[in-house]
Each structure stands twice: as structure tokens, then as C-alpha cells.
Image: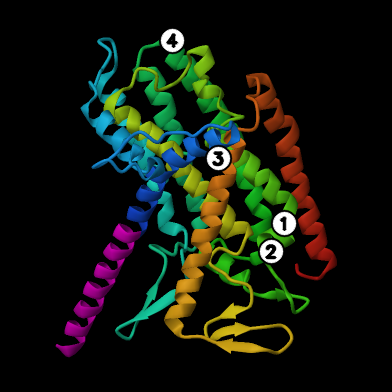
Amino acid sequence: MMELIEANKDMLLFTAAAGVKVLAFLGAIMGFAGLLTLAERKVSALMQDRIGPNRASVLGFTLNGLFHPLADAIKMIFKEDFVPARAEKLLFTLAPMFALVPVLALFAVIPFGDYVMVFGYQLDLQIADVPLGIFFVLALSGLAIYGVFLAGWASKNNFALLGAMRGAAQMVSYEVVLGLTMVGLLMIYGSGSLQDMVRAQGKLLFDFIPAWGIVLQPFAFVLFLTAAIAENKRTPFDLVEGESEIIGYFMEYSSMRFAAFMFAEFVEIILVAMLASTLFFGGWQVPYLYDTGFIFPGGGALELDHYLVAALQVGSIIAKTIFFSWFLLVVRWTLPRFRFDQLMSLCWKGLLPLALLNILVTGAAMLLLGKI
């Protein structure tokens, strides 16, 4: 009887912990995505020597434009929710969900820390440690293609359909390259779990260089980031929503349905930033920081409290995510748009052969070093 009570207690604690992690992590992601809508306009304003949005105010306070995301949300909620008369209404409604939900679900396998002890229980700082999490990322991210294509097709608008066809071709193509850039990491770290990969990056090469993915797979990082930007349909690869061409798979959408597509784009920025940090920059790892504190290569040590170590680890992944999110915004306002033929040629004639070559070189290097 006592064993049954203990088992129920453990199950209840596990369920409560999972719920808290989901609410806290996804809540932070949604809030950060909202701030990115302001940050993108502020970055462009800074680069173009403008002030940027600064008019929305509450009780006379503007906080340098901080209320604009809230104003945007209110505007979206009260706009007319227009549905074209000829549209496939069910698929027209489901398309924004297909675009947003798979992206949010992907955060479940991204670790935002190692673990923290709570009332004697070890709480892993990851919603779900899937053994093949890297394949889960690739599989679920592919579902977003349905949101793009269904939006264009269900609108019964030729220009929207053209954008959807571009989007499907672009996302399918760059999904292949995106997967191949991760193969080298799988070979080196020997695990498909993102948490295992991050822990493996805590080791030291030559007793002083962190074994981060950027050190072991620098070429794969460049290919990954390029493919990820294209997968996210961001400039310079925003052919699916070429505003100057009046083409876009969501051009018939308004109100909160349009907001779902827009929000999905900014959530994907955070996803790309977190994946780049996790796979290539140590994730939550801080160089020379271990469970007990800092242990430096020369023999010095600095003992730290367990909760301070956990806070530094979480702060590390947050800082790296903010940096890469900022970098993606800068790219958005720096590079001109490709032509569609250039976009596809870059993938199939450029990035794909280079990704395969990277796998070949990685395998040859591991064979020479006796790691196979």
C-alpha cells in the first residue's frame, strides 16, 4: 500500500513539474516573440538612422516603444476576421494552426539547463528528453510546410497559391540540407538526444578548449544557419511573401489568423537561435563550469552553490539565444532578396553538395583519429 502511495506521489510530482516547465518555458518564448516584433523594427530604425516605433503610450509613458507589441495585439484582435467567399473554410481556419503549433511543440526537446534540486527531487530543465530529439526536430518542423501550402491553396487566390508553391518547394529543399548539417554532430557526439549533445560539449579538447559544435563542426554551422534562415522564410530568402510582388501565402488572412502566421515567424527565429546555441555553442554550458562550480584548466577552482550554478547555466542559454535572435534580425535588414532560381540553385547546387562533403570529411577525420 505504501509503495502505491509513493508511486502516485512521484507521478503527481512529475506531472506538476512537467506542467510548470511547459507554462514557464513556453510563456517565456511567447513573451520574447512579442518583444522581437518590436526589436525587429528598432533594429531597422537603428540601421537606417531613424527612431523607430515610440508613440504607443500608457498614462503618458512610452518606454521607448515597449507598448507597441501590446498595441499590435489589440489591433489584431479587433480587426475584421475576413474569410474569402470561395475559400475552403475548414482548411483556411486550420492552416495558421499548422504553422504555429508544430513550432511551439519543438521547444519541448530543447534543454534550457541541466537540472535543479527541488525539495530533494531532481528536476530536469527540459520538458521532454527524447532519445532521438534531433530527429524529432526535423520531423515536426516539416509539418509547418502544410500550414504554408494549405493557407495558399485554401484561399482560392492565385497569388496566394503562387506564394504557397514557392514556400513548399523552398521548405522541402532546405529541410534536406538542414538535416544533413546535423549528421556530423550525430557522428561526433554519438547521440540523438539534444541534452546528451549539450553535456558532451562540456568536455575539454586539449584540456582547455570546450568541445562545442562550432569548434568541431564550424563549416556545418555556416550551412546550418543559412539553411535555417531559408527554412524560416526570412530575408534574403523571403520569396514566399514577396511584398513588392504582391505575393504571399497568407495574403487573404486578417485579424488573429494573420497574427498566428506572423507570430510563428518570430517564434521560429527563437527556435533557430536556440538550436544554433544548443548544437554549436554548448547550449546551457558555461566554459569550465561544473556541478560544484568553476574548475579552470590551470588547476584553480571556484566553488559555487548548486542553485547559482543552475542559474548561470540557464542564463547562458538565454544570452546565446538573445544574441542569435539579434543576429537574425540584422541579417533581415542587411541582405537583398534572392531570385527564386538563385534560391533553389543555392540549395541543390551549393549547400547540398557542401553538406555531403562535410559528412565525408567528418567520417574520414574520425576514422584517422580512431574514433570509429
Residue at x 51% of width, y 85% of height: 304
Residue linked to disc 1: 217
Q: Nearer the viewer, mark 4 or mark 2?
A: 4
Instruction: Tell me the CA gap for discs 4 and 1.
Output: 43 Å
> Which residue is more in the foreground, 96 or 305?
305
From the image, give the main secondary structure of the stretch colored magenta.
helix
- Residue 122 on image: x %, y %: 37, 79
For the residue carrying disc 3, how many other residues have a C-alpha within 10 Å: few (<14), some (14-19), or many (20+)?
A: many
Instruction: Tell me the CA gap for discs 1 and 2.
Output: 9 Å
Q: Is residue 302 above or below residue 332?
A: below
Residue at x 39% of width, y 22% of height: 250
Check residue 188 in the rendering and tell me which mark sits there, or answer none: 2
Residue 99 visible in the snapshot: no
Residue linked to disc 3: 329
Q: Are marks 4 and 1 in contact (CB under 8 Å)?
A: no
For the residue carrying disc 4, how many other residues have a C-alpha within 10 Å: few (<14), some (14-19), or many (20+)?
A: some
Instruction: Tell me the CA gap for discs 4 and 2.
Output: 47 Å
Sequence-first tag of 1 and 3: 1
Instruction: Tell me the CA gap for discs 3 and 2.
Output: 31 Å
Identify the magenta region. Answer: 1-24
Sequence-first tag of 4 and 2: 4
Name the residue type under label 2: Ile
Tell which residue pokes out farthest to the left in this image: 1
Sequence-first tag of 1 and 2: 2
Residue linked to disc 4: 158
Q: Nearer the viewer, mark 4 or mark 3?
A: 3
Which quadrant holds the C terminus?
A: bottom right
Instruction: Tell me the CA gap for discs 1 and 3.
Output: 24 Å
Instruction: Tell me the CA gap for discs 4 and 3.
Output: 30 Å
Sequence-first tag of 3 and 2: 2
